[in-house]
Image (spheres, rainbow, N blue to C red):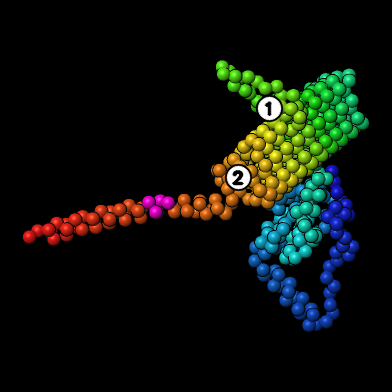
Amino acid sequence: MVLDFAQLCDLIEITPSTAPSQPARVSTDASAQASTTAAIQATAAAPATEARPRQARRAEFTGVNTLALAGPTELCFAEHADQAEAVSSSHAGAVIVPPDFPAVEGPELLRTERPRERFFRVAEQFVPRPSTPSIHPSAVIEASAKLADGVSVGPNAVVGADVCIGPRSVIGAGSVIERNVRIGADCLLEANVSIQRDCRVGDRCILHSGVVIGGEGFGFVWDGSAHRKVPQLGRVVLEEDVDIGCNSCVDRATLGETRIRRGTKIDNLVQIAHNTDIGAHVILVSQSGVAGSSRLGTGTVVAGQVAISDHLEIGAGARIGGQAGVTKDVAAGASVFGTPARPMKQTLRELAALAQLPALIKALKGWRAELTELKQRISELEKAERKP
């Protein structure tokens, strides 16, 4: 993929400068010539650590990168003024910056609102995509499966009976799609994804390598002598624009459905148990887990290694800090932290107090010694008063 400068400007919504780069005009005025000569001499005498001259405009861009690693045909972004030195020393072809970013020499600065957002809009253009839709000869596809136009199926993938796959979706190598699964349009299943029977996947979903959708929920009943398995007869439904990271699992419902609502993004190594309802635009960070039948409201953010107990209600917009253990309902918009999870400010105050505990214990030992000494002196005084 190659973007020319005009395409780049369209993507970041700016108007490209049309003025050609020209050398400075030489003045015939004597005083101006003297001033110019002095400026040239000052530049020549400047230390080598000063910023490099402005690079020539790049006609084409072949990728994006960090400021430190970018090459002359790559694009970067910077958001804060304290990055000015890094921008100046970068070898990038251009850098997207906010309107008030300092003027520095080096890469061309493309000024626009929300540079991070604009940068990733450009970055999307460089995401590798299948060149042409294809069905690999080693793929196993049941005769009753229905694949829409533009579907790609990779090596050793299995597509079961009565499966329906929407237009332009990609099934990665080694993936298994069991019977009666529905997959929407423009989905991407990376290598070794498993979607088990009867599950539903909406449009534009991305399932990364190792994801399992519709595995059996962890349901057992003690009958007095052994754990008896509870049949897991439900399904999983992923709505549109859901993204699930590597090796995460979403269990099918015991009855009914486990649902992940539209726009939710799930990190690697996350466990979603049976009959949960994960709201729209939720963020679940790696190694977090949601136990059975809990509900997460729209826009909830769950940090890494959080454990949410079963049958809980997490209100819309709640924020749960890393490694928290949630054992009670959380109100909408609340921020909680710790185990058991409690209001963020309360937990931070308690942790600050806990940090002072060693000093308090040391002081307490000193007070105890002083008290013992005072008791001894009082006892001696009392004995002296009793003597005739």
In this rendered view, identify the residue nearer to me: 359 or 136: 359
Quadrant hosting residue 82: bottom right
Residue at far left of view: 388
Q: Which residue is mark 1?
A: 217
> Start and end of the magenta stretch?
357-361
16 above or below 243? below
Residue at far right of view: 149
Q: Which residue is mark 2?
A: 322
In percent of width and height, residue 2 lies at 85, 46
Give the SS element for disc 2.
loop
In percent of width and height, residue 252 lies at 73, 28
Residue, x 54% and y 50% (percent of image)? 347
In percent of width and height, residue 161 lies at 84, 20
In this rendered view, identify the residue nearer to me: 236 or 113: 236
Q: Earlier in the sequence, mark 2 or mark 1?
A: 1
Give the SS element for disc 1.
loop
